[in-house]
Amino acid sequence: MSGEIQLRSDSRRARSGQTDAPGEFAKQAGVEVFDREAGRYDAWFESDSGQALFASEVSCVRHLVRGLPRPWLEVGVGTGRFAEALDMDVGVDPAPGALRYADKRGVKVLPGLGEALPFGDLEFEAVFIIVTLCFAGDPAGLLREARRVVSEDGGVVLGIVPAESPWGRFYRQKAAAGHLFYAEARFFTLDELKQLARGTGLRPERSVSTLFQEPGRGPCEVERPHEGEDENAGFVAMLCRREEEAAGKGSA
């Protein structure tokens, strides 16, 4: 792919840096809190636990995506932590408050919903959805859009906290107690994730796992990634490829 990434004609105004526009998406379910509390969310990454967990997750994703060509898009870029660490080419998020942090980190950002990406078909060699699917209003719609904008030979990279892992149960308990951020989340098991991916025209190809330490038991440590998927891992990164036969079923 060569030249500038092409935006849809109705998204020309949403170019990099224009993150102070009215929060047209921010009032949607699950978005307003990340707009309003972006600073609080971002500060967690500076905590001791946040730094260790984030470093482990970044290492896991890096291990998975070695050799993937560019350009790369992150859907749900948030405050730009993963985008900065992984050197994303562009990121999309519906929360203006979060995008301002990403913009300051030097990430090229656009306001928008993952379910209606402001790009043409087949624009990217890789689309990343890292700990974002659990906050999506329409997870299947988000994955269909990722499939639409990724190239025929490209990959869609999913990063989740498996629901039945110790970390998944830990976060679900926080959600049930009304946690500011996790209350809006829906956690998926690995089987649910693969079923969802296949139903939207994506074929799971390979996974890498990390975070086998127990949550809430002292300081967190940086972990190395492990090849393969594991329901006991606190974070799993999964590479999916397009299933071309799905194109005739409304999943283009």
Image (cartoon, grey):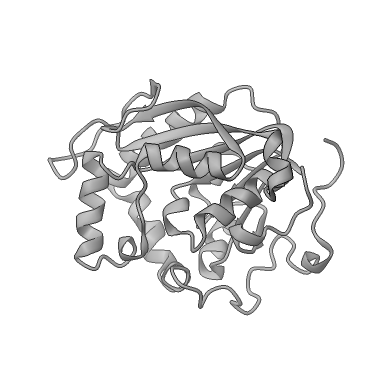
Let me know if residue 85 appears in the view: no
Is residue 212 toward the left or the right of residue 24 in the image?
Answer: left
| Quarter occupied by residue 172 | bottom left
Expressed as whole percent of the image width and height from the top left, the position of residue 127 reads 62, 42
Expressed as whole percent of the image width and height from the top left, the position of residue 95 reads 53, 67
Vertical comparison of 95 with 79: above or below: below
The residue that appears at 80% across and 48% down in the rendered structure is 5
Is residue 82 toward the left or the right of residue 47 in the image?
Answer: right
Is residue 82 toward the left or the right of residue 225 in the image?
Answer: right
Vertical comparison of 232 with 137: above or below: above
Vertical comparison of 39 with 164: above or below: below
The residue that appears at 63% across and 22% down in the rendered structure is 67
Expressed as whole percent of the image width and height from the top left, the position of residue 122 reads 77, 42
The residue that appears at 72% across and 42% down in the rendered structure is 247
* Residue found at the very far front of the displayed protein: 249
Q: How many marks?
A: 0
* Residue found at the very far right of the displayed protein: 3
Expressed as whole percent of the image width and height from the top left, the position of residue 194 reads 46, 37
Vertical comparison of 174 with 5: above or below: below
Q: Quadrant of the N terminus?
A: top right
| Quarter occupied by residue 165 | top left
* Residue found at the very far top of the displayed protein: 227
Let me know if residue 243 appears in the view: yes
Camera-side residue: 70 or 194?
Answer: 194
